[in-house]
Image (spheres, rainbow, N blue to C red):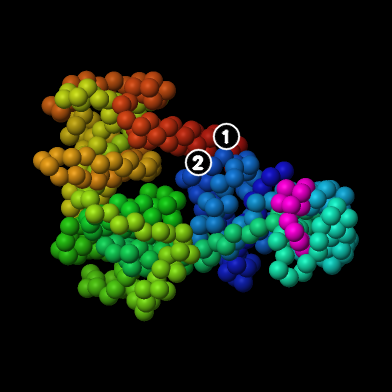
Amino acid sequence: MQCVLVRYAELGIKSDQTRKMWLRQLRDNVVRCLAWDDIPYSRVKIVQGRLIVYTRDGSAPACLRRVFGVASVSPAVELPSDMERIKKEALSLFHAHAPKSFRVTSQRVTKDFPLTSQQINEQVGEAVYEAGGTVRLTAYELNIRIEIIHGRAYVFSSALQGVGGLPLGTQQRGCAVVETERDVLAALLFMRRGCPVELVVLDTNQAGQYLSILQDAACCGLPVILAKDADDVAHALCTYRDAGTKVVVSGAPLVSAEGMLNLCPCELYDAALAQEALSLFGVAMKRNRTAHLFSAGGVVFSGDEVLVIRRSDDGTWVLPKGKVQPRERFREAAAREICEETGLCGVSVGDYVGMSRYTFRTRGATYAKDVCYYLCETPTREVRLERLFDKHLFVSPEVALGLVSFENDVYLLARAMRLRSRHATCAAPGHT
């Protein structure tokens, strides 16, 4: 059976009670990460020193390595702890890679196997050697690795380094001011200590990229307030402080709101160390010289049907959205714009669905726009369209997929359908 072994580090040194609680949080974060990247899986199991994710999706290891608290991940094959089966899988791995040299490394994570690690190495190594392999304990091309856990054997050859740290959600929440690359790094380092973040994002040309990096790291839609200048930042910090947030994170010291502690986890990093740290998180920055705008909108459901609206100028069918104003939370912007464009002013704004990105030209200038969409529900269908639109429909999501005019909206509708399906599954009796 194909699976991914997920190892953790710092959790292992905690007390039993803390470790059990934080392991449950890590498992929840792993599940959220898989859902965020639309990776199918059958289950996630906690065993001694490991989490085991059962999936056949080859992109799962790269996804799981970025979960905070994960030390390393390995795509593996799970077998009964039978030496003949283990040898057969080791040979399959050897023939698939066709290396010039190999070694065998085994570990009994639990001690419920009659052979020692050295005996396992010798027997598996002998079988591969007889099949034409050349043993080399150093400078080898292939390391055939075996782990024995609770009567099961896991055979694999690689381990991707994870970001490490503590599971997100195990420590105190903070807010992060994000204007520069160093601010992004500061927020990532803070999250690596298990701390969830809310964001104050300065509306620069790089803002969309920065927001995407941090939301991908958290595998969820983070609370965001948009800021144009220092006054907007101060106002946003006061908003978070009044809601109970006591820590503000930044790449360099700033004047924080009274009653808030300013942390700068990368203040002493030089440029080389900062780039190295960003690389650990899998972040590669791209320079965007195009003027940037943020918008927010919703995939609005009424029962099992979704709302689509038609623009009167070009006849395109779209989802409702509009520009985020300074000092405005993105979720509030989504609700306001839905109300302004459709007259549906009582929508409930739920989970983050995803971000749509595109460029457009107006008055001789090119703009890049990032639109954050949320899953919304409306209690009424009394639509009063803004003059920019001439028609609306409530249709099944399947019909809407064929009706909307842009690929971005197709992607968002599909994401919203999967999100609603997961919610229905989680609400079903007997689901765990």
Farthest residue to the left: give it.
Answer: 363
* Residue 230 location (% of width, % of height): 17, 65
Q: Nearer the viewer, residue 37 or 340?
A: 37
Image vertical order of residue 200 relative to residue 388, above or below: below
Q: Taking 320 as reference, is 192 left or right?
A: right
Q: Which residues are magenta?
A: 92-103
Kindly identify the residue that appears in the image at 27 percent across and 75 percent down: 253
Kindly identify the residue that appears in the image at 19 percent across and 44 percent down: 366
Q: Quadrant of the N terminus?
A: top right
Instruction: Tell me which corner region of the image, top left, top right, bottom left or bottom right, holds residue 301.
Output: top left
Q: Which of the marked residues, 2 or 1, is nearer the chain's N terminus?
A: 2
Quick check: can you spot residue 119?
yes
Disc 1: which residue: 429
* Residue 105 location (% of width, % of height): 76, 64
Disc 2: which residue: 38
Instruction: Tell me which corner region of the image, top left, top right, bottom left or bottom right, holds residue 394.
Output: top left
Q: Taking 198 as reference, is 392 left or right?
A: left
